[in-house]
Image (cartoon, coloured by chain):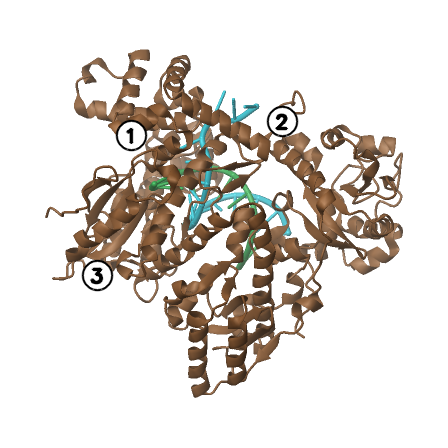
Chain colours: A brown, B green, C cyan
Amino acid sequence: MGFFFVQNKKADKNLKGLSPEFLRKHECNVCPLNNVENAHPKMEATGSEQPEVLIIGEAPGRTEDERGKQFVGKAGKVLRDRIPDGWDSKLRWTNAVQCRSPDNRTPEIIELNCCKPRIERDVVRTKPRAIFGFGATPLFQIVDPDSKHRSISLWRGRKLPVNVGGHLCWYFPMHHPSYISKLRKYEPKDLNSYGSDEEFAFVCDVKNAFGQIDSLPDPVIHSVEEATADIELVDDINRVAELLEIAGNDPTCGVDLETNCLRPYTTDAKILTMSCSSRSTTFAFAVDHPGATWTKLERKQLDVLIKRFLYEAKCRKIVHHLPFELEWFGYFYGTGCFYSSVWEDSESQAYMLDARRGGLSLDFLCLINFGLNLKAISGLDRKNLEKVPVHQVLRYNGVDSRYHRLLYIAQLKEIKARKLKDLYEHQMRRVPALVLATMHGVPIDQTVVESFESKYGGRLKAALKAIEDDIDAKAFAHKKGWAFNPLSPRDVTILLKEILQVDSVATSKAELDQIDYPIAQKIVDCREAQKVLSTYISPVSVNSGENVLFPDGMIHPIISTTTVITWRTSSESPNIQNWPKRDEERKEVRGQVKHKDARKKNVEMRIVSFDYAGIQARNVAMESKDKALVEAYWHNYDIHTTWMEKLNKAFTKWIPKDKLKDKAALKAFRHLAKNKFVFPSFFGAQPFSISASLGIPQNLIEGVQEEFFDQFHDIAKWHKDLEKFYFKNGYVTGLSGFRRYAPVSANERINTPIQSDESIIVMDAMARLSEMEDPRYQAMLMVHDDLTFLWPKAEIEKRAEVVIKELITLPFEWTRIVPIEVEMSVGEDWINMAEIGKFANNSWNGIVELKN
DNA sequence: GCGAGAAGCGCG
DNA sequence: AAAGCGCGCTTCTCGC
């Protein structure tokens, strides 16, 4: 077997050449803390001899050492205050390390190893049903995840089955109360208030943990032997057919691919191996791994078998990180299987249950759900699977598909228990729609790219030359002994402080614009050119060594649905969602997005965008059901002009007298009122910051905002209701039912439902269009409130009518309170976009006409 | 030489 | 007490 245990590298180093086995054998005799002079050295566990719960801290603090008892200091009170009545006699207390270190430092790996047998003996003897572990120290004394998963913030609030010296029980990781105490921004006045958002989350964790004790199931831990047992490695084509048939007729089947690279679009991209796991069988077979033994004919037959499985097998196909497998299956076997099969995604489930970043990997979830450390059975070079012997890749592949399915089954219970089944259905409809967008690709015109490369490249060169010649840069080099680097925040800080001698806290553009020395502008010029070039031009240039282009001349940005904590999508490789649009000059980089047939006669490919008009503000109306705001939408009241006028009435110096009849100037002030007063107020901005951004005294803003919430009093009430709900339930939710768990800060609590409502409205429309299974209605891009398509000019009107109807006909009852409107624009490229019209669901006649 | 984190800046 | 939210990418810096 190719499986072996991989030691944590960092741990190795900190062990100073001693093995964990050695340390655990000799315990105190080899522990650096053995002879420390403490009031209570080697403090034994205290409390119940038959505990329900064992509480493990880090190490005794000063108070603890003095009194010979755990958690009795100031930090200990933060925890003890939160223990529900009636539990005192059911608790046992100990620490990961039993001796206080002289300088009260965090215990070292050696000490933790020496002390581990003592804890194991205690646990085996007293048999607690659960362990509440506070801080990272006791957690990682017991479990050994890889370095990516060693932050306690990722673990707190969950539970996992553990085996401590042979006793199986549940472990509840939580932050250490001393950390919570340190994070306090103020002293809570009673038990209904919290010193920080994290403290509220901590209190939720403690409460939830105690609340679960009575109903805990028996912990089950999967051993490495079980995880790797009975995986059939198949090299007989008839047997592959047989097993695919069996698995395909089971209700659920885990599916996993191993490939030689991340994306399928390059000519050398290969599926190396594939594996399936259902209730009756787990098997894996080579596809194009160099170690495969298929004859040419068999290899052809294999494709037919895989295709038949993908298109016809009735099982629910379960993947962990489904977008990856769909992209590969779609590329090699056609995208028809996206909708002909039922696909499930255990990563999406995990995201719904707990969206914390870094907590979605199969390894981590297996530790949480099954106490199984997959890390310990891999041990092979994941990045170079082509070089790994095929039987090893197959075993590895088989374990993964097995755990895709087991994880799905385990998490499905929890999804149902939390009543998230409907939302999961929505989430699963997002995946194929977005994979199809990714596969569609975004065309890039290299002649445009080249012209920008030369333009911004030249500008960068000139800016660098100007800095080289600058007198202050020369003074800098003379004084510091190295050349001034305008891109280095450190160098710019030094320049500002020591050479120019100006007061400045940051080195941002806003600060630099205030500075009178010529070098300030030169730094800004340099940064701008470098930013545009390196972020938006080089990545799509064939001339750049590190571009994200594929052989088809397109970019295929990955639009993810399991990254953003609020249910928005994110985009990477490249991030196509943040290309310049506001800056009049730099927005031209969008012109790089252009189809090669944009000017071809009788084709004239066009970029066609549909943007939900003011969707977030409409979401505020949906969430708050505010009477005044809702009415404004139905009657087209311009609330922003109203509040511009009110702001100017309160602070008459705001709009200069001579501008009061200047239409263009008033438009700009309306824009300010909208974006710096109305919307921020919806989202919880305080007079302090609104005052700063508008330049109107704070006391005047306070007055206007009071009047504002007087008019929109249901918005004020909604803000208050959100608070109440959050502190009662420990999470924030929105009309779609998604959840974001504590800690969530005050303004995040307001913003989160808005972002998620927005995303669910737009993604549902994109999915409905995609489900037509007609490439004409498959969006190419999704940018939060915008869906973009690539169509031949002659088809635009006809197709737009279908798309607009779908976009403004929303299937969610909760959206009906306000009208919904989309704005359509068309362009030869992504910058020269002309607005075609606005289409609202309370007025549109169903027809789209292009005026030439 | 690599990874993590901060600063800075682009979008909705 | 701090003072609308959510991202990804590039560069620099620092520590290993």
Residue A715, image quadrant = top left
Residue A581 vs residue A405, the one in the foreground:
A405
Q: Position of residue A837 (x, y in %)?
A: 19, 41
Residue A85, image quadrant = top right
Residue under label 1, please give it.
A633
Q: Is residue A271 above or below residue A294?
A: above
Query: Can you say which quadrant of the picture contains the N terminus of chain A?
Result: bottom right
Residue A656, image quadrant = top left
| Residue A355 can be seen in this image | yes
Q: Which mark is residue A596?
A: 3
Label 2 close to label 3 by CB (< 8 Å) = no
Give the residue type at disc 1. Tyr
Q: Position of residue A530 (x, y in %)?
A: 35, 46
Residue A283 vs residue A601, the one in the foreground:
A283
Left or right: A429 in relation to A282: left
| Residue A830 can be seen in this image | no
Q: Residue at x 72, y 39 (%)?
A: A210
Give the residue type at disc 3. Lys
Left or right: A130 in relation to A275: right
Q: Which mark is residue A195?
A: 2
Dot 2 lies on which element? loop
Q: Position of residue A830 (x, y in %)?
A: 24, 50
